[in-house]
Amino acid sequence: MSKRIEQSFDVVVAGGGMAGVCAAIAAARGGARVCLVHERPVLGGVASSEMRVTVHGAGHNHAFARETGIVSELLAEERSRNHEDVNENGWTNSVFDQVLYDWCRREPNLTLHLNTTVLAVRMEGGGQADVEPHTDRGYYLREACAPSRRIEALVARTLSAEVELVLAAPLFVDCTGDAVVADRAGCEWRMGSESRDEHGEPHAPAVASTATMGSSIHIRARDVGRDAPYTAPEWAVRHEDASYFYEQGRVPSDPRGGFWWIEIGVPWHTIHDNETIRHELTRHALGVWDWMKNRDPLMKERTRTYALEFVGQVPGKRESRRVVGRHWLVEGDLQERRVFPDAVCHGGWGVDLHTPGGLLAATSEPAAAENYREDSGYAGETYLKPYGIPLRSLMARDVDNLFVAGRCISTTRAALGSVRVMGTTALMGQAVGTAAALLRRRGLTLPALAEDAAAGGSLVGELQQQLLRDGVHVPGLVNADPADLARTARVTASSTQPSVGLSPQDRAPFDGLVGVPPRERSGLDVALGQHLWCSGRLDRVDLCLDNDGDAPATVRLRLVRVDGIWDSRKGGEEVLAEGAVVALPGAGRWATWDVGLDAGAPGWLRIETAEPVADVSWRAARGVLPGHFGVRHLSATRWRDVHGSFAYRLHPAQQAFAPGEVLSGTTRPQASPSTWRSDPGLGLPQWLELTWPQPQRVACVELTFPGTLLREVHGTPPFYVEPQTPRDYVVEADGVEVVRVAGNTAWRRSHRLDVPADVRALRVVVLATNGDPAASLVEVRCYAV
């Protein structure tokens, strides 16, 4: 006989993937009593060791766009603990499981129920949703049928313990992926694809369809150092045709496995046929390994000593139900980077819509099928610059106390192609968790917040400012917290790094990242560019070039003003100067352009090559300075970010990293570099100081250091700690030490003083970093309480 337990909370979060974990932690940190219920034994969902998909996000395509906030804490901790490399898929191990579990267990306000499945939703006043979906519009549509506007409790069962749980709360968050809570509560949802004409979306199909992207399982192999024969079971798929792999976008290039393209959906339903899909994926996964080991002309020898050690048995889903919310997010919102008054997080993955059918289709996902060409028409059309996501898309329309986060949010399928990746869904989770805690503290309802959000009111403004304070980036928003005393301070520092450019040999931040620079040089047969900060005057620019020809070559250039670091328009806002340099034959030759530019106001500029040049390449720099990255040709009108820098020199030195940048209002390069850096040639310690004309009562000091924002987590090696992060530092109030930290690895730290002090001068002294020769800070906040 089952045991029945009833529990009450302020917020119940269903689903413990990246969205659910971040939602639960955020709500708990906000003071709410939270329950996180998850049907699997480990947290992380698709990112767990059961499925092993590593976390992707906006940092994949864009320099300095990586997600921050709770997800950044989790990924940074995983990298500092983990002995394994990161690869695209199949590499997540139990270290990440334990980090997620650890972070949840640390929160005193968070109750965790694992191995627990939500079976039913109890609505206020009784009744249940009983309307079946139809396909009258071509896709699955289930109309709203909620018997009331409020959920009272979730009914769940812990199968391993024969325990039935009734989890009551005034607020709920559906992070189940399949929208289990929203479905059972009677919310309207869609599944499948809208037609191109329904919302004017260029990447929707011409005709609406029930087809969805498929689910995947991964395989993992290990080199055992001796011959490791493999014989597949009779029921495994047998492959004989190399073109299936090498001409259709399914290249088995890594002997260790991985392979997101082991994917199947159509003709099966990704929810109801999940077990059939699991079996079919297993048949195909073993067939892929059998092909690699025994018949693949390119991989047979490479895999000779590799033995299969992991075959996933929990399909990782990309798509199922999408809940109709209070804003319906469409592809145009993302392509146009629409400004929402209630933006609470950002995305930046491309419009990545996999071919329905996966392994059963004629070709794999389109970008893979064309061998990931960086400048193809498809690449240009699907490339998205970082965009904002509105809170209203994370609120169910038909139930008044339900948030949604993850791939089940209120979005079309075309927009889902971008917002579905886990870095983005983790930010959604933190946003709704923070919103739920705010509502409980203020005694307000979700509909009241939705109304305020649509108008860009004070309540959503408070939420946005809290998210910024907690480390989340929201496009277009800056710190405007009236309680932050630092905003009125004057800032000085012991030294400042002059911005003079980088050579192929210079040390610079981000040393140690994998793939930085991505290549030693890039040919000028395609257009290239380099972002730089200009303080106002620029007399000369030098470029480090290779000329493989026998004669000097002329490289025509232009210098353009750009609107922030993610302005991808060729030509930017305006062309400020045009000229040319001569590339002499040889390697690593510096070529000079006498620009003679008086740009007036400080701002971002970009050097752009104006036309192709044969036999000439631009050398890569060893490092990258904050915001100073390169770009390369994407289309006739747009650039693609390069997660690295080209080698260049500036005359005179520019003041890119002044002390006042810590009060820019953002914690990453945006409208300005937003980073103070000391002069690396002067060594450590170095200090930054805030002063006020009158004493300020300071009880809390919050510091943000530069994080690993240049690339996503895949660029970080095992046991990695960001070199720019101060390892040892002190905080002094009017010359008296009030904080001392040793062995720090965190990118954000909040220090509550033992005794609040009346302070005229607050100094942060960096004694040692985790490898960078310069001290760095991106934000300092001070609070009276």
Image (cartoon, rainbow, N blue to C red):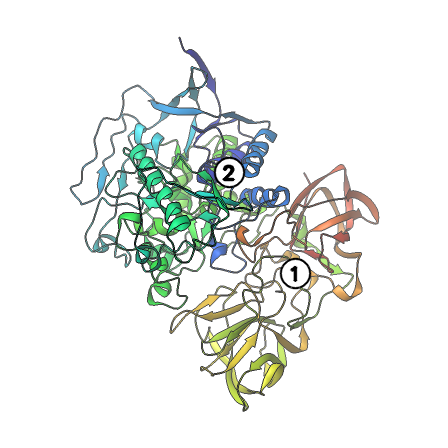
Question: Is the N terminus in the top left, top right, bottom left or bottom right quadrant?
Answer: top left
Residue 33 relative to residue 216: left or right? right
Q: Furthest residue to the top?
A: 1
Residue 586 lies, with reference to residue 634, above or below; the image says: below
| Mark sitting earlier along the chain (1/2) | 2
Image location (x, y in percent) of residue 195: 22, 52
Which mark is drawn over residue 509? 1
Q: Amino acid at mark 2?
A: Cys
Residue beneath the point at 82% across and 49% down: 734
Give the secondary structure at mark 1: loop
Q: Nearer the viewer, residue 226 or 731?
A: 226
Query: Does residue 501 show up?
Result: yes
Q: Amino acid at mark 1?
A: Pro
Residue beneath the point at 47% across and 83% down: 613
Badge 2: residue crowd in 10 Å (few <14, some 14–19, many ≥20): many
Image location (x, y in percent) of residue 173: 42, 33
Badge 1: residue crowd in 10 Å (few <14, some 14–19, many ≥20): many
Mark 2 = which residue? 22
